[in-house]
Image (cartoon, grey):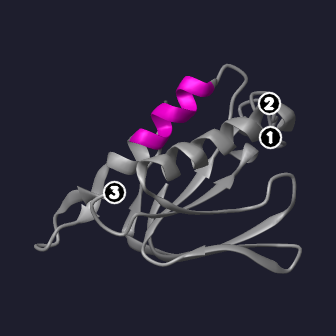
Amino acid sequence: MQRVSSASVTSRGVAVGAIGAGLCVLVGVAHDDGPAHAVKLAGKLWNLRIMDDDEGVMNRSVGDTTGALLVVSQFTLYGDTSGGRRPSWIAAARPEYAEPLVGLVVTSLRDLGASVATGRFRTEMAVSLVNDGPVTVIIDI
């Protein structure tokens, strides 16, 4: 997850999602993740205090500030390079299992009041962002 000034995603040359200031979130799903993980992740993203307050201190959440998130599915986060030079994707959940869980993250964020833009599942995407800070955090639920 990255705090951004702006972020967008295109798929097959078509812009499919964009936000201004907020969070760009790459979501990877593993085999043992479930609905509870998705809901917990949404809550963590919404409430994590990494946005600046009026004094420039990371003391506010995206829920307190812009409310904007760009959520992009990213199975390659589970690439394992320990066995050589070619990553193994065995730890990543199959698309038919992962897609509903990424959808649940998005739905849960929207239920909290977030304005959520998304990528497009099962397509090659190009993500463009202007990192704010830079602030990049790994959240493992």
Q: Residue at x 54, y 24 (%)?
A: 36
Is residue 42 in the magenta section? yes
**Which residue corresponds to mark 1?**
87
Instruction: Give the image quarter of residue 66.
Output: bottom left
Residue at mark 3 to residue at mark 1: CA–CA distance: 36 Å
Q: Position of residue 92 (x, y in %)?
A: 76, 33
Q: Secondary structure at mark 2?
A: helix
Front disc: 3 or 2? 3
Residue at mark 1 to residue at mark 2: CA–CA distance: 21 Å
- Nearest to N terminus: mark 3 or mark 2: 3
Viewer can see residue 57: yes
Q: Position of residue 130 (x, y in %)?
A: 50, 78
Task: Determine contact: label 3, label 2, CB under 8 Å.
Answer: no
Q: How many residues crowd around disc 1 within 10 Å: few (fewer than 14), some, or many (20 or more)?
A: few
Viewer-side residue, 57 vs 120:
120
- At label 1, the amino acid type is Pro
- Nearest to N terminus: mark 3 or mark 1: 3
**Which residue corresponds to mark 2?**
97
Instruction: Give the image quarter of residue 61.
Output: bottom left
**Which residue corresponds to mark 3?**
63
Q: Secondary structure at mark 1?
A: loop
- At label 2, the amino acid type is Tyr
User: Is residue 111 shown left or right of residue 79?
Assistant: left
Front disc: 3 or 1? 3
User: Is residue 101 shown left or right of residue 5?
Assistant: right
Q: Secondary structure at mark 3?
A: loop
- At label 3, the amino acid type is Gly
Q: Residue at x 51, y 34 (%)?
A: 39
Front disc: 1 or 2? 2
Q: Residue at x 42, y 48 (%)?
A: 112
Region in magenta: 35-43
Residue at mark 3 to residue at mark 2: CA–CA distance: 28 Å
